[in-house]
Amino acid sequence: MGWIVALIVGGIAGWLASMVMNRDASMGIVWNIVVGCVGSVVGNALSGPLLGMQGSVQRFSLPGLLIAFAGAVVLLAIVNLIQRGRVR
């Protein structure tokens, strides 16, 4: 059951990040889920040592969603730098 929640939360985080980074038109639902789930891993890797907080997308929580969203934004910013040489 936890992986279903992780996919849903990852999809929401990825969709929100793609809206903020202005990439929503070029991404589908599958890529939103992938970006959100990978963003959650990136967000947890950054927020643990820097802020001392951890979030999980295995069960829904607001800190977990915010950390996944922040990680997805960082991930999309890196993708923008690689693809276009600038952050939108």
Image (cartoon, rainbow, N blue to C red):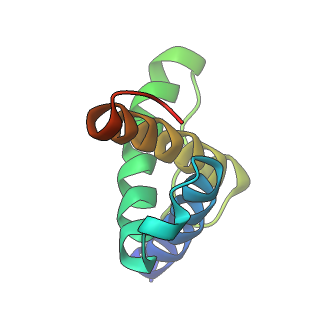
In the rendered image, the vertical position of residue 75 relative to residue 24, given as above or below:
above
Q: Position of residue 2 (x, y in %)?
A: 45, 75
Residue 4, above or below 54: below
The residue lying at 53 percent from left, 49 percent from top is 68
Q: Position of residue 47 (x, y in %)?
A: 52, 27
Tell me: 65 left or right of 14. right
For the residue pair 85 and 61, the one nearer the viewer reads as 85
- Work out which residue is located at the far top of the displayed protein and give it: 50
Residue with the most extreme right position: 62
Residue at horizontal 65 percent and vertical 47 percent from the top = 66
- Please state which of residues 39 and 82 is positioned toward the viewer in this rendering: 82
Q: Residue at x 40, y 57 (%)?
A: 35
Left or right: 16 with respect to 33? right
Q: How many numbered marks have been drawn onto this rendered protein structure?
A: 0
Q: Is residue 79 above or below residue 18?
A: above
Task: Name the residue at the left extreme.
Answer: 82
Quarter of the image for the C terminus: give it: top right
List x then y, in percent, for residue 48.
Answer: 48, 26
Residue 16 at what x, y percent from top left? 63, 59
Quadrant where the N terminus is found in the figure: bottom left
Residue 65 lies in quadrant? bottom right
